Amino acid sequence: MIIRQETTSDASAVYELVKTAFASAEHSDGNEQDLVVLLHKNPSFQPALSLVAEENGKIIGYILFSEIKIGEKTAIAPAPLAVLPEQQRKGVGLALLQEGHRIAKKLGYSISVVLGSETYYPKAGYVPASRFGIVCPFEGVPDENYMALPLQEPAGDWNGTVTYDKAFFEV
Ligand SMILES: CC(C)(COP(=O)(O)OP(=O)(O)OC[C@H]1O[C@@H](n2cnc3c(N)ncnc32)[C@H](O)[C@@H]1OP(=O)(O)O)[C@@H](O)C(=O)NCCC(=O)NCCS
């Protein structure tokens, strides 16, 4: 398996992959593939952080980190992360996260924030975002499901509420 930056010719495969992966997901609004399309058109989109996992010429996983704001500061958020059902639980998702973190660190991003499974994301190093003073903008999200991973040392002061790209509210 290789992990590489997505190219324009991957668009339809990525769309179908995200749709298929979320069709059987525990939490889904069924629009994740359309969120990907919208995010590609916005300034929060970072081509270097739109990654595919490819095996034998077939795309089996996808991750998109887009820019968010924590107060006035810029950070990133992985959403969505998707792996084809028949390829799940083989380490593809974690490999996509780790490669994204490596690239983001090199690009100078300082922290990644995620809303997701409290049993999955800690495997990639995420801890509750509240530890850094980061506030989730959505009501009713359990503390354990809103997580962050500092990408630089020291972790720094991040007090503030997160603002997401408008695409997240348009799908
Ligand atoms: C969530 C998802 C991306 C994980 O990808 P994956 O390639 O299957 O994950 P990995 O193989 O890298 O997972 C490694 C570990 O996480 C665990 N894990 C996998 N999926 C999990 C899930 N949905 N919830 C909790 N733990 C999970 C695995 O059991 C494994 O744990 P272990 O090493 O202790 O055995 C994939 O299941 C998926 O595409 N799901 C549908 C879309 C989705 O829900 N995306 C996440 C949105 S927040």
Image (cartoon, grey):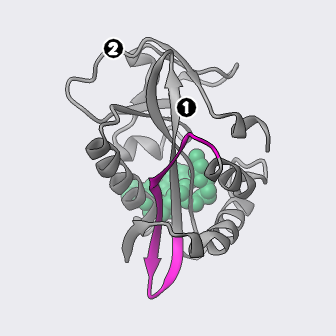
Residue 145 — which label?
A: 1
Q: Is residue 135 left or right of residue 109?
A: right
* Coordinates of residue 149 in the picture (x, y in percent): 36, 34
The residue pinned by badge 2 equals 157
Camera-side mark, 1 or 2? 2
> Within the image, what quadrant is residue 168 found in?
top right
| Residue at x 77%, y 52% (from the top left corner) | 31
Label 1, secondary structure: give it: helix
Q: Which residues are magenta?
A: 42-60
Query: Badge 2: how crowded within 10 Å, few (<14), some, or many (20+)?
Result: few
Q: Is residue 56 above or below residue 44?
A: below
**Magenta-colored stretch includes residue 54:** yes
Q: Nearer the viewer, residue 54 or 89?
A: 54
Mark closer to the chain start, 1 or 2: 1
Q: Is residue 15 left or right of residue 124?
A: right
In which quadrant will I find the C terminus?
top right
| Residue at x 35%, y 36% (from the top left corner) | 109
Query: Badge 1: how crowded within 10 Å, few (<14), some, or many (20+)?
Result: some
* Coordinates of residue 160 in the picture (x, y in percent): 49, 13
Q: Nearer the viewer, residue 49 or 140?
A: 49
Q: Is residue 48 above or below residue 66?
A: below
In which quadrant will I find the N terminus?
bottom left
Label 2, secondary structure: give it: loop
Q: Amino acid at mark 1?
A: Asn
| Residue at x 48%, y 16% (from the top left corner) | 72
* Coordinates of residue 15 in the picture (x, y in percent): 68, 66
